[in-house]
Amino acid sequence: MAIVTGGTSGIGRALSAALVRRGDTVVLTGTDGAAAARVAEQVAAGGPGAASGAELDVRDAAAVGGLVAGTASRYGRLDLLFNNAGVGIGGRIEELSLAHWDRAVDVNLRGVVHGVHAAYPVMVRQGAGHIVNTASVAGLLPNPGFAPYAMTKWGVVGLSLALRGEAASHGVRVTVVCPGGVDTPMLDRGMPPDLPRLPSVEAIDVRTVIRKLNGGRLHDADDLAADVLRGVDRNRPIVVAPRQARIAWRLMRLSPSLFLRLSQVLAARDPDLRSATGVAAPATGELPGRRLSGGRER
């Protein structure tokens, strides 16, 4: 028995479909209840598992708690919770209002906290279960121009790894998923329409920027779902995919200063990335983050 939040499109839909194909029963949620029911019907057709849809705003802790409790009661247990719902909030920091920061925190971080708070006690009582939190490679790497999103995803990584350390003694497993750029509708939605418009965001094609930041291509959502479920089956603490995201993560772990310098150089050379990240074009004889004087670095 699995719950997938943010299950009506993108990664959530792909995860739901993959779970149903392997025989699991899934409750997939979305803020639009009609869309959730429609997607659940489509996903269920791929059987042999089953799927149903439910309306849920992960910002509502009581609603999350009610869904988890009701699902566990109806099916007798809760084996998997995928805290997947998220929102893309970016922009240059000097342009961001508190409303932008609040929305990122409320959905991307508090939404995960609400899921954990509701499901973890159920799984502890069962002595089994697996919580899977969707973060991002932005939760492992610096992301100028996407600070609210990156901040919340770093928080999800920290929460997940801390919880994993506690949960093992109760028989509960925890995995955090950190994908690179994935081909999902989120890339085309833009900023939530009820938030103030940002000049730096309006001026860029987010899909193009994310593709360039991820080595020129986007990962397929169905391929990512397969990566995630393979990681879950193997009880991996962190799932990073695709390959280019893992390479970037390893470089960051090896030398943060080198990774930052290379990222700035690449961003400065590309007009789309300069516009999105706010990195200035280098002056003659100068690389971002490095001044040359008499042939010496200072």
Image (cartoon, rainbow, N blue to C red):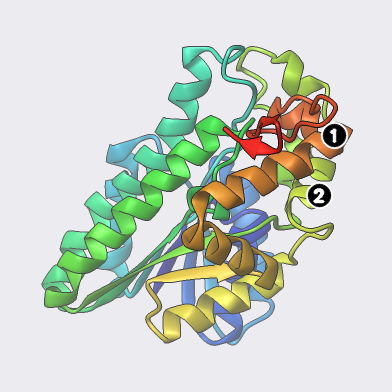
The picture places residue 75, in percent across and down from the top left corner, at 31, 73
From where the camera sits, is residue 154 visible? yes
Name the residue nearer the viewer: 149 or 298.
298
Q: Is the residue 20 above or below the residue 151 in the image?
A: below
Residues at discs 1 and 2 in contact (Cβ within 8 Å): yes
The label on residue 148 is: none
What residue sits right under mark 1 in the picture?
A: 272
Is residue 237 left or right of 186 when viewed as pictured?
left
Q: Residue furthest front?
A: 294
- Could you say where residue 115 lies in the image, as x and y percent from the top left? 33, 51
| Label number found at residue 212 | 2
Which quarter of the picture shows residue 278?
top right
- Identified at 75% across, 67% down, the residue is 220
Judged from the image, the secondary structure of the residue bearing numbered disc 1 is: helix
Q: Quadrant of the C terminus?
A: top right
* Residue drawn 12% across the image and 76% down it: 169
Vertical side of 73 occupied by 58: above or below: above
Note whether 155 is above or below 216 in the view shown. Answer: above
Residue situated in front as seen by the camera: 86 or 216: 216
Residue 119: image quadrant is bottom left
Q: Is residue 24 at least partly visible in the picture?
A: no
